Image (cartoon, rainbow, N blue to C red):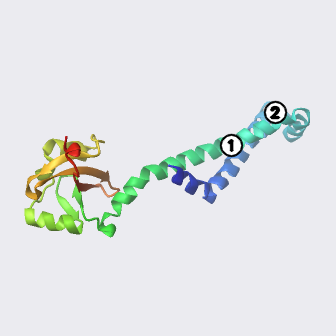
Amino acid sequence: MWKSLIVTLGERSIYVVTVVAGTLIILYGQVLVPWVRGSNNALMDMMVEFEQQPLASILTFTVAFLFPFSVGVCSSTLAQYRMANAKVGASLSENKFGSAFRVARNGKIVGAGTLTGALLKSDRAQMVQEWLGDKLWRDIASGKSTEQGCVIYVKAWSGHYVVNFALTVDNHINLYLTRAKSDSQVE
């Protein structure tokens, strides 16, 4: 999350939007509203108010710029944070993870890392439900399951595996299988 915040603060567009939105807020609140209410010289009224109550005027200007800045930073940071998993997952084919494979929403295996590809060929499995079971796969594919790290037993590979997954931007799901290291993971 902090890395996303640092990247966001380095983007020029955040500051441009802040200046434009802050200026529009000030023009609306300090010029347009008084003009609509009948002020003959709204800019002069703003200057008089600044001389009479400088702290209140400075606070008004500060809030007018801080509000769009904070909204922009928060929304950009959260968007980057949310997309981080999708970016990592979407780069599966480029990274060639050894114990991972990509699955379509219907359960058909559409791609695999080198190690997993060899295991898949030896097992001749075409659908992920053969390892995960129908219920776990339905939960993952429907987006209902957010549980990472569940353990399954893969008979063809003679072992327990920890299952993690990431949804991708191209409507696939990357599954990551890691052999369970101890009996405590199997429980």
Residue 99 vertical position relative to residue 18 in the rendered view, above or below: below
The amino acid beneath tag 2 is Ala
Type of the residue with mark 1: Leu
Residue name at image x 65 percent, y 41 percent: 67
Question: What residue is shown at x 35% (from left), y 56% (from top)?
Answer: 169
- The front one of 169 and 147 is 147
Along the line of sight, the residue nearer the viewer: 132 or 51: 132
Q: Which residue is found at the position 31% from the left and 52% from the top?
A: 166
Give coordinates of residue 91: x percent, y percent: 35, 64
What is the x, y in percent for residue 113? 24, 66
| Residue on which disc 1 sits | 66
Q: Is residue 160 left or right of residue 156?
A: right
Q: Using the image as rendered, state which of residue 157 and residue 132 is in the foreground.
A: 157
- The residue carrying mark 2 is 56
- Residue 1 is left or right of residue 153, and the answer is right
**Mark 1 surroundings within 10 Å by alpha-carbon count, few (fewer than 14), some (14 through 19), many (20 or more):** some
From where the camera sits, is residue 89 visible? Answer: yes
- Number of on-image labels: 2
Q: Residues within 10 Å of mark 2 (few under 14, many from 20)?
A: few
SS under mark 1: helix
Q: For the residues marked 1 and 2, what is the alpha-carbon distance in whole angstroms?
A: 15 Å
x and y percentages locating residue 140 in the rendered image:
24, 45
Image location (x, y in percent) of residue 102 = 24, 59
Of labels 1 and 2, earlier in sequence is: 2
**Foreground of the two, 18 or 167:** 167
Picture layout, residue 19 above or below residue 53:
below
